[in-house]
Image (spheres, rainbow, N blue to C red):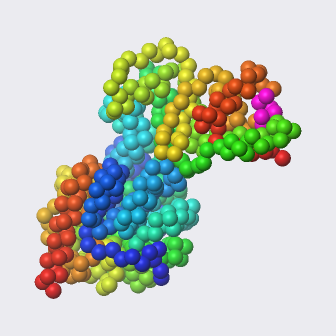
Amino acid sequence: MTSLQDMQRMVHDAVFETGPDGPALAAISEHIEPSDGFTAAEHLLIYRRAILGTLVRALGAIHPVCKRLVGEEFFDAMGRVYARQTPSESPDLGDYGENFGDFIAGFEPAAELIYLADVARLEWLWHRAFHAPDEDSIDVAALGAVAEADMGNIVFKLPISANLLVSDYPVHRIWQVNQDDWTGDQAVNLDEGRVRLIVWRRGHEMHIDELDAVAWSLLSRINAGQTLGEIGTAEGLDNLDEILPHCVQNGWIAGFALQA
Amino acid sequence: MTRFTDKPITGAGIGLRSRHYQEILDTKPSIPWFEVLSENYFGVGGLPIYHLERVRELYPVTLHGVGMSLGSADPLNFDYLARLKKLAEQIEPTYISDHLAWISIDGRHVHDLLPLPYTEETLAHFADCVLQVQDFLGCRLLIENPSSYMGYKEVDMTEWEFIAELVKRADCDLLFDVNNVYVSGQNHGFDPYEYLHSLPEGRVREIHLAGYEEQNNYLFDTHGYRVHPPVWELYRETIKHLGPVPTLIEWDNDIPEFEVLVDEANKAQKVMSDREAAA
Ligand SMILES: [Fe+2]
C-alpha cells in the first residue's frame, strides 16, 4: 500500500505540474478512483484549478493596483506562472507573495510596464505594514535624557511596520490614482524621476510618505543598524540637527537603544 | 478538557467578514455568535485584530482554521499552533475547529483542503496529531468533514467510519458541515443521510451551512451562495437527529450584504425552533 507521505507528494507534484499529460498526473491517476463523470486525472485537475485559483486570488487581494494596471486576465495568467514556481511556505496565506515584485521584474510579457515590479513591491510593503504589530511612538523624554557622552551610541529604530522603497518611477503617484476612492487627475508623468518612500502604519493610519534624499539617507543608515556616531560622520548628513527632529516628528523613527 | 471560555453558544451564528465589521459594531445585531477564520488574525496588530476584539466584547466567538494540516505526513507546525494559541488566549473562543484534510506536504502549502486516503495508517496518524494539538492547546478540537472532489483507490473505510473511529481514539469533537456532506455525497455517490445517521453520539458541537456551486457534472463548495434546498432538507433531518446544535452560515466568496447572512441565519434558527416546538 502506498504510504500517506508518498500519496501526498504525488498529489502535490501533479497539482503544480503544467499541462494535461505530464508524468506526475499520470502517476497519481493510478491511485485515484475514477467516477461516472470523470477520469482519475480529471478529479485531480479539479484540485489543480482550485489551488492555483486560491493562490492567484491571494496575490490579487494583496496587489489590487497591479491587477488594475494589467487587467484581470493578464494578472491571473501572470499569477499562475508565479504560483507554479513559488511554493507557499506558510500556513498563513497572508504570507504568500513576498517576492512577486522580483518575479514581475523578470517576467518577459510584462517588460513594457517598467514600473509594474515596483508597484507590486509597494503593495507588498503596504500589506505587511497593515498586518504589522502595534507599537508605541518614541519616548521623546527618554531621548532628551540621554547623557551627552552617550549620544554617539544611540541606535535608532524605524517603526516595526516600516519599510523603505526606492523606485525610478513615480510608483506612489501610480498607486494613488489607482485607488478606488481617487477622484482627482489620473495623469501620471513617468519622467517625474526617482521616488524614495517609507511605507508604515501609525495606530490604524496607513502611511506612504515620500522622503527627500537626506531623510532617505538617514533612515537607510538607521535601518542598517548604524549608531548616531557613525551616522554623524556620514557624507551629506551634516545638518543632522534639522533632519533628525524632522524624522522623529513624522513618526519615521519609533524608538532607540544605547549600544553598549 | 477545558475550553477557553465556558460561555456556551446556541442558535444560528454568522461568519465574521471584514466588510461587515463596521455595521456589526454600529448596529449590534441580535446574532447569537460569530465565527472567524483564525489565520486572518495572525497578524499581531492593526485593524483586523482591533475589530475582532471589539466584536468579541459583544458576542461569543468560535475560531475556525484551515492551517493545521492535521492529515499531512509532515510533522505538526508548532509555530502555527503557537500563533493560534496566542489568538485563543486573547479572544477566548468557545470552540477551535479545523478539518479532516491536509493542506501541506514537505512544508509546501496549497491553502485548499485536500482529501485523505481513509486507511488505517492515516487514521493512526491523524488521531495522533489531534491528540498532540489538543494537548498543546489545552482544549478539545472540533474536526470538520470537508467537501471533496476525488477519492483514493486504496482505502480501508468510508469517511464516516473514519470519523467514528477518530472520535474514539482522539476524544475530539466534531463540526458537521451539512453542505460538505451533501456536496461530497453527490460527487462520490454516497448517501448523506447514511453519513448523518452514523455520526457518533454527543460529539457534534457545531454545524456549518453554506452554498455550493454547480460545475460541469460536479458540485463545488464555493461558499458564495445561499444554502440550496436539498441542503436545507438534509439540515432539517440533521437537527431532528442531533437536536438544535449551534449552526453557522458560512460565506467566503462574493460576500453579500449583512442582511442576506442574517436572513439565512434566521432560516436555520427557524428549523431549530420548529424542532424544539415539535419535541
Ligand atoms: Fe464548513
**Which x, y percent locates residue B191?**
19, 73
Q: Residue B10 versus residue A62: which sits nearer the camera?
A: B10
Examine the image and state in which quarter residue A8 appears: bottom left
Going by the picture, which residue comes out furthest to the right? Answer: A149
- Magenta residues, dominant SS class: helix
Q: Is residue B42 visible?
A: yes
In the picture, which quadrant includes the N terminus of chain A? bottom left
B75 versus A9 height, above or below: below
Which residue is painted at 45% across and 24% down in the image? A173
Which residue is painted at 48% across and 67% down in the image? B88
Q: Is residue A63 left or right of residue A235?
A: left
Going by the picture, which residue comes out furthest to the top? Answer: A191
Q: Which residues are magenta?
A: A227-232
Q: Is residue B186 visible?
A: no
On the rendering, which quadrant does ligand 1 occupy? bottom left
**Which x, y percent locates residue B68?**
47, 64
Which residue is painted at 40% across and 63% down in the image? B56
Can residue A230 be found in the magenta stretch?
A: yes
